[in-house]
Image (tube, rainbow, N blue to C red):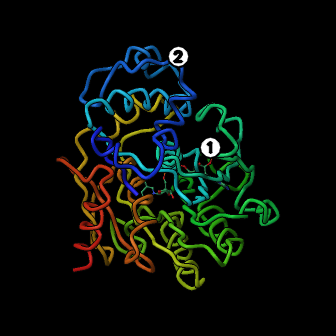
């Protein structure tokens, strides 16, 4: 449920403001002062980190909350009440994944993060409160890593794992498209609880045309073929799914920026969203837009069992407004 933080609306709330994200983070942030709203002035505490400052996202989320606190006074933002969801994020240390994790934290949505390198997660997200976000170490290539405990209570899952399309250091130890994009997703699908309400898989445009130029070039080492095989197994699994086929990903994060820097960098000018169906879209998509699409689709019933492709272009976009996202997904189907 979206909460408009206009002060007058706040007084009508059925829950105490202390139970909201703002309330929770206020309690945890006694020393941070609201020195900025979301209208563009920069928070000096954020500036301190800069691009090279490596501020962990977990901390940066709190820093961003300082902005939200400032915005409460101006009625400038919407945030969500605590959610009953428990979202499993697989690939949360990646470009899109980091943004998804940060966004879930900001929305006060609980998560389980299945990832290979907890130290990397710590450097990105800081010390996470286990009651909100719990880290599980695991590699999707190995079924025995997918301990049932990871999936306990999980209501929704988002998978944004991937590796490079062409041989690179990231293929080290056979972490190839075949192993990650196909076998890893297959293993994950087998391990997901049957009670899952939604599984969102980030895939790629071009998967249905991997024999045609220019896709055949991208597919030289099979990445599109293996992503399509993963899509197919998700489709057949019986699990309620949504597949988001991203255009060529642009913008950060390429490394662990603080979230404020990261949002400014990624939101950039490419905020307008184009959603299509039928693997017809060709273009680019901001990672922030893809991350937001994954989160939004969890709550849009009619996206269940559907495949969409997504691009983003210069212009104003839906931000995190659920109604605008619904319209975009609906329009893609017409
Ligand atoms: N790049 C593009 O232009 C493009 C276009 C369309 C679609 N896509 C797809 O969009 C998705 C997100 O892209 P991105 O750029 O955000 O990806 P990314 O930065 O490459 O992140 C990939 C994530 O997958 C994780 N991962 C890799 N192998 C794994 C394994 N065996 N077990 C568990 N986790 C594993 C990585 O973990 P580590 O941190 O441990 O490595 C990382 O968190 C990917 O599926 C990608 O293929 C990309």
Residue 168 or residue 282, whichever sits in front: 282
CA distance for labels 2 and 1: 42 Å
User: Looking at the picture, does residue 171 appear above or below residue 71?
Assistant: below
Residue 266 horizontal/vertical position (percent): 35, 39
Q: Is residue 266 left or right of residue 154?
A: left
- Can residue 280 be seen here? The reply is yes
Q: Is residue 153 above or below residue 320?
A: below
In what element is the residue under mark 1?
A: helix
Residue 48 versus residue 128: which sits nearer the camera? 128
> Which numbered circle lies on residue 31?
2
Quadrant occupied by the N terminus: bottom left
Residue drawn at point x = 49 percent, y = 41 percent:
21
Q: Residue at x 31, y 78 (%)?
A: 278
In front: label 2 or label 1 = 2
Indicate if the residue with disc 2 has its beta carbon within 8 Å of ligand 1: no
Q: Eyeballing the image, is 241 above or below 257?
A: below
Q: Residues within 10 Å of mark 2 (few under 14, many from 20)?
A: few
Quick check: 291 left or right of 270? right
Q: Which part of the image, by quadrant, shows the C terminus?
A: bottom left
| Residue that carries the numbered disc 1 in the rendered image | 169
Residue 194 is situated, as x and y percent measured from the top left of the image, at 66, 78
Which of the 4 image quarters holds residue 86? bottom right
Which picture quadrant has residue 208? Answer: bottom left
Local secondary structure at mark 2: loop
Of the numbered discs 2 and 1, the one sitting upstream in the chain is: 2
Q: Position of residue 173 (x, y in %)?
A: 73, 51
Nearest the viewer among 116 and 73 is 73
The residue sitting at the right extreme is 144
Classify residue 291 as left or right of residue 134. left
Is residue 102 at all visible to an observer of this figure? no
Circle 1: is it few (<14), some (14-19), or many (20+) Cα within 10 Å? Answer: few
């Amino acid at each position: 449920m979206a909460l408009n933080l206009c002060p007058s609306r706040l007084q009508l709330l059925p829950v105490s403001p202390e139970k909201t994200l703002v309330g929770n983070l206020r309690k945890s942030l006694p020393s941070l002062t609201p020195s900025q709203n979301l209208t563009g002035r920069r928070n000096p505490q954020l500036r301190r980190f800069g691009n090279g400052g490596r501020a962990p996202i977990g901390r940066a989320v709190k820093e961003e909350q300082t902005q939200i606190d400032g915005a409460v006074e101006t009625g400038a933002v919407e945030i969500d009440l605590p959610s009953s969801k428990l979202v499993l994020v697989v690939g949360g240390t990646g470009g899109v994944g980091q943004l998804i994790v940060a966004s879930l934290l900001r929305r006060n949505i609980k998560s389980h993060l299945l990832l290979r390198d907890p130290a990397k997660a710590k450097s990105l997200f800081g010390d996470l409160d286990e009651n909100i976000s719990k880290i599980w170490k695991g590699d999707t290539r190995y079924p025995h890593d997918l301990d049932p405990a990871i999936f306990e209570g999980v209501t929704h899952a988002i998978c944004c794992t991937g590796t490079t399309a062409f041989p690179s250091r990231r293929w080290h130890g056979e972490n190839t498209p075949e192993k990650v994009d196909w076998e890893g997703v297959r293993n994950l699908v087998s391990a997901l609880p049957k009670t899952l309400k939604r599984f969102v898989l980030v895939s790629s445009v071009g998967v249905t045309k991997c024999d045609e130029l220019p896709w055949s070039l991208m597919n030289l080492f099979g990445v599109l073929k293996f992503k399509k095989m993963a899509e197919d197994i998700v489709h057949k699994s019986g699990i309620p799914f949504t597949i988001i086929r991203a255009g060529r990903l642009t913008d950060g994060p390429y490394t662990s920026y603080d979230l404020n820097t990261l949002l400014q960098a990624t939101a950039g000018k490419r905020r307008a969203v184009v959603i299509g169906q039928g693997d017809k879209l060709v273009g680019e998509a901001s990672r922030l837009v893809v991350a937001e699409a994954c989160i939004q689709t969890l709550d849009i019933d009619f996206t269940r069992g559907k495949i969409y492709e997504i691009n983003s272009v210069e212009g104003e976009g839906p931000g995190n407004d659920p109604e605008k996202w619904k319209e975009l997904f609906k329009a893609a189907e017409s």
